[in-house]
C-alpha cells in the first residue's frame, strides 16, 4: 500500500495500492523474458505505460454523488463531481509535450454484486474491481461519506486511493486502474473526526492519484520544506516540489498561483508519453552513481537536475525548475538471492520481485529529461520516512548516503569537494551521457570481496606546521 501523507495539525492520507515495486520516476518497469520461476514481465528495462495507440484512456464514473454529509444530504452532486473529475484528468491531458488523453465513457458498468446506482458496499467494490482486473473498465468511485473506505478497513484519514488492476505483461502496457475518493473531505463539515480540505487541496490530491494511474511514481525534490514544515510554503520551493511528492503538507499549488503540475511531472509524463514536440523541448542528462571505489554502482540515491539560478530575476530558478529520479530506477529492487526473506507475494528469494530489469549495467543508472538550460546535478538520500506506501525508488527501506548532498563536477573522484558544482548546458535534443558521480565517504561496496577493484586510501596530505595548526 502506498500513501501520500498530508502533514498539518491533522494527518491525512492518500493511498496507492499496487503489487509492484516503485521506481522514483516510472511506477512499474519491465523485467523482460521469463527466468527460473519468474514469468515474463514486460520489456526489459522499459517502463509500463498505457498503449499510446489506444488513446484516449477510457474511465467510468460512479453514478452517485461526490460528497454527502452524515444526514445523507448531498453536498456535491454527481454532475458537479463529474465536472471536477474531468478537470483532474484534464490537468495531465493538457501537457503540451505529452501524447496522453482520457475520455469519460459514462457510468460504471454492472459487475456481479454491483448492478447500478451509487456504489456503496465492499461487495460492490470487489465486483467492480474484478471487472477492472479483467480490463472491462477503469472505475472512478465516489465514496460520498467515507463509509466505503471504512468497510474496506481503511482509516478515516484516507483522502482516496489508486490501485492498478491489470497489466499486459507481454507487451509492457497498463490495462486497468481504479481511483476511489473520500467525499467526507468535501462535506463542508469540520470536526475532530470529520476533517475537511479546500476544493483545490482535494482536487490536487486526487490529481496526484491520477499521476499513479498514468504510471508515475513518487518524486523527491525540495525535501528541506518537509523538514521545516512551514504553515505556508514559500512560492519558489513549492513551485519545484512535485505534485507526486509522497507527503502533502503545503497549501494547494493552485492557491499559490502555480500550475498544478511541477516541471518534474511535466518532464516525466512527456518522457513516458512523448509526442512530436517533445524532442524540441527537452534534452537528456544521464550517468551512473558510484560508490567511492568508482566501480560499484550505487542503487537508490535521489538524483536531481536543477536549473542554474538567474541572479537578474526575483525568482530562484534552482528551486523552481528541477527534475529528479532515483539511481537504478530501471533495475529491480530485489534481483533475487538466497539470504533475505520474501518481502511480498510478488517476489521470492530465488527470482526477486516482478518489476525491474536484471541488467546489472542499470544498477545506479539515471536519466533525466530537462528543458533547455544550464543545470547542476546533485545526489541525496531518499528520506527515511519514504517507505512502503510513501516509497520513492526501488529500495524499501531507502538507502542512507553519508555526507549528502553531493554535486557533479568535471573532476569527479571520491576525494573531491562534494559541494563543488559544475554547470551542464543542455540544448533541445541533446543527449548528454556519462555524467557520473563518485560518492565521497561511501567506501563500502555491495560486495567488498569481489575482484575488479581495490579500495583506495585517502590521499596523504603534507605535514601541517604548528602555525597552520593554530589557524585550522
Image (cartoon, helix red, strand yellow):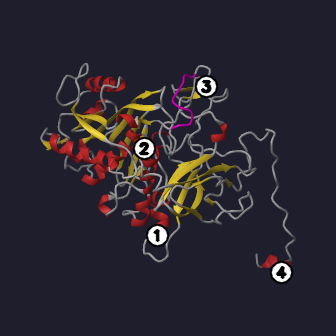
* Residues drawn in magenta: 38-46
N-term-proximal mark, 2 vs 3: 2
Toward which corner of the image does residue 348 lie, by quadrant?
top right
Q: Residue at x 33, y 47 (%)?
A: 93
Q: Is residue 81 above or below residue 127?
A: below
Which secondary structure, mark 4? helix
Q: What residue does disc 2 label?
A: 273
Looking at the rendered image, the disc whose residue lies closer to the viewer, 4 or 2, is 2
Q: Is residue 356 visible?
A: yes
Q: Which mark is residue 316?
A: 1
Front tag of 1 and 4: 1
Residue 101 in percent (x, y) is at: 32, 42
- The Cα–Cα distance between marks 3 and 1, rounded to whole angstroms, is 46 Å
Distance of mark 1 from mark 4, alpha carbons? 42 Å
Mark 2 surroundings within 10 Å by alpha-carbon count, few (fewer than 14), some (14 through 19), many (20 or more): some
Give the distance between the C-alpha atoms of the residues marked 4 and 3, in whole angstroms: 61 Å
Q: Earlier in the sequence, mark 3 or mark 1?
A: 1
Q: CA distance from mark 2 to mark 3?
A: 30 Å
Q: Mark 1 vs mark 2: which is more N-terminal?
A: 2
* For the residues bearing labels 2 and 3, Cβ distance under 8 angstroms: no
Mark linked to residue 351? 3
> Where is residue 414 drawn, in percent x and y?
73, 57
Viewer-side residue, 186 vs 409: 409
On the picture, is 297 further left or further right than 133? right
Label 4: few (<14), some or many (≥20) within 10 Å? few
Residue 120, given in percent of the width and then of the height, sits at 22, 30
Q: Which mark is residue 467?
A: 4
Amino acid at each position: 500500500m502506498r500513501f501520500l501523507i498530508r502533514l498539518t495539525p491533522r494527518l491525512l492520507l492518500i493511498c496507492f495500492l499496487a503489487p509492484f515495486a516503485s521506481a522514483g520516476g516510472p511506477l512499474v518497469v519491465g523485467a523482460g523474458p521469463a527466468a527460473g520461476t519468474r514469468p515474463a514481465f514486460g520489456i526489459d528495462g522499459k517502463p509500463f505505460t498505457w498503449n499510446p495507440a489506444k488513446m484516449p484512456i477510457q474511465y467510468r464514473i460512479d453514478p452517485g454523488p461526490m460528497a454527502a454529509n452524515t444526514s445523507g444530504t448531498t453536498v456535491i452532486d454527481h454532475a458537479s463531481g463529474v465536472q471536477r473529475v474531468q478537470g483532474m484528468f484534464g490537468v495531465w491531458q493538457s501537457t503540451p509535450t505529452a501524447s496522453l488523453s482520457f475520455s469519460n465513457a459514462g457510468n460504471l458498468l454492472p459487475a456481479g454484486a454491483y448492478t447500478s446506482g451509487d456504489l456503496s458496499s465492499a461487495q460492490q467494490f470487489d465486483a467492480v474491481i474484478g471487472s477492472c482486473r479483467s480490463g472491462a473498465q477503469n472505475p472512478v468511485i465516489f465514496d460520498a461519506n467515507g463509509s466505503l473506505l471504512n468497510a474496506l478497513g481503511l482509516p478515516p484519514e484516507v483522502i482516496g486511493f489508486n490501485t492498478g488492476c491489470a497489466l499486459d505483461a507481454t507487451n509492457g502496457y497498463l490495462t486497468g486502474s481504479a481511483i476511489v475518493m473520500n467525499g467526507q473531505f468535501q462535506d463542508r463539515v469540520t470536526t475532530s473526526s470529520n476533517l475537511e480540505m479546500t476544493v483545490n487541496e482535494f482536487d490536487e490530491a486526487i490529481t496526484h492519484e491520477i499521476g499513479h494511474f498514468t504510471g508515475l511514481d513518487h518524486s523527491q525534490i525540495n525535501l528541506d520544506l518537509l523538514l521545516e514544515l512551514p504553515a505556508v510554503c514559500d512560492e519558489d520551493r513549492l513551485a519545484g516540489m512535485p505534485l507526486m511528492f509522497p507527503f502533502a503538507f503545503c497549501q494547494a499549488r493552485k492557491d499559490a498561483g502555480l500550475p498544478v503540475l511541477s516541471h518534474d511531472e511535466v518532464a516525466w509524463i512527456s518522457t513516458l508519453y512523448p509526442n512530436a514536440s517533445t524532442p524540441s523541448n527537452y534534452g537528456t542528462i544521464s550517468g551512473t552513481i558510484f560508490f567511492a571505489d568508482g566501480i560499484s554502482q550505487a542503487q537508490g540515491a535521489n538524483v536531481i537536475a536543477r536549473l542554474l539560478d538567474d541572479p537578474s530575476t526575483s525568482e530562484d530558478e534552482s528551486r523552481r525548475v528541477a527534475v529528479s529520479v532515483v539511481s537504478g530506477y530501471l533495475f529491480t529492487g530485489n534481483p533475487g538471492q538466497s539470504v533475505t526473506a520474501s518481502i511480498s507475494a510478488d517476489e521470492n528469494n530465488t527470482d526477486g520481485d516482478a518489476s525491474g530489469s536484471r541488467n546489472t549495467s542499470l544498477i545506479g543508472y539515471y536519466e533525466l529529461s530537462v528543458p533547455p538550460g544550464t543545470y547542476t546535478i546533485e545526489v541525496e538520500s531518499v528520506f527515511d520516512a519514504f517507505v512502503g506506501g510513501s516509497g520513492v525508488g526501488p529500495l524499501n527501506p531507502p538507502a542512507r548516503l553519508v555526507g549528502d548532498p553531493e554535486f557533479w563536477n568535471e573532476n569527479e573522484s571520491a576525494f573531491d569537494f562534494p559541494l563543488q558544482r559544475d554547470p551542464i548546458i543542455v540544448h533541445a535534443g541533446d543527449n548528454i551521457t556519462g555524467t557520473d558521480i563518485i560518492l565521497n565517504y561511501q567506501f563500502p561496496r555491495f560486495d567488498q570481496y569481489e575482484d575488479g577493484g581495490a579500495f583506495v586510501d585517502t590521499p596523504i596530505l603534507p605535514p601541517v606546521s604548528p602555525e597552520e595548526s593554530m589557524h585550522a
